[in-house]
Amino acid sequence: MSLRSRLGLCALLALLGGCLMPAQGTPVFVDMRAGTFWSGKGMLLEVSPDKTRCKVAVRDRALILHKPWVECRWVHERSSR
């Protein structure tokens, strides 16, 4: 495999690693008041011990996956349909 092919493969894997939604988590809707997202559809990954902050996986307008901590009052349950 040539160096150019290896670099292309590494770049592709890095890109996909930042774009795939996590398989584990609870499907949620994140209110736009929590940040600037491409869509409110996300995954709840973790809740703080005091249940005021939630770690969610959401996409920004460039479709890059982010995992910010937001206030749980902006995170709402949604069906997984």
Image: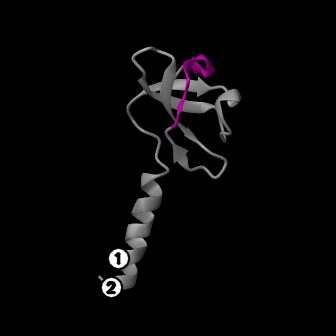
Say above or below: 30 vs 63: above
- In terms of depth relative to the viewer, which is nearer, 69 or 63? 69
At x 42%, y 21%, the residue is: 48
Residue 58 locus on image (x, y percent): 55, 38
The residue labelled by disc 2 is 2
User: Label 2's element?
Assistant: loop
User: Label 1's element?
Assistant: helix
- In terms of depth relative to the viewer, which is nearer, 77 or 47? 47
Asked if one can make out residue 81 in the rendered structure from this viewpoint, the answer is no
Q: Which mark is residue 6?
A: 1
| Residue kind at label 1, given as amino acid type | Arg
Q: Residues within 10 Å of mark 1 (few under 14, many from 20)?
A: few
Q: Using residue 5 as the reference point, say whether residue 57 is left or right of it.
A: right
The figure's colour scheme reads one colour
Residue situated furthest front in the rendering: 50
Report the quarter where the C terminus lies.
top right
Q: CA distance from mark 2 to mark 1?
A: 6 Å
Residue 10 locus on image (x, y percent): 38, 68
Residue 47 locus on image (x, y percent): 43, 21
| Residue 49 shown in magenta | no
Residue situated furthest top in the rendering: 50
At x 66%, y 35%, the residue is: 35
Residues at circles 2 and 1 in contact by the CB criterion of under 8 Å: yes
| Residue kind at label 2, given as amino acid type | Ser
At x 60%, y 49%, the residue is: 63
Say above or below: 20 vs 4: above
- In terms of depth relative to the viewer, which is nearer, 71 or 21? 71
- Residues in magenta, as a range: 68-76
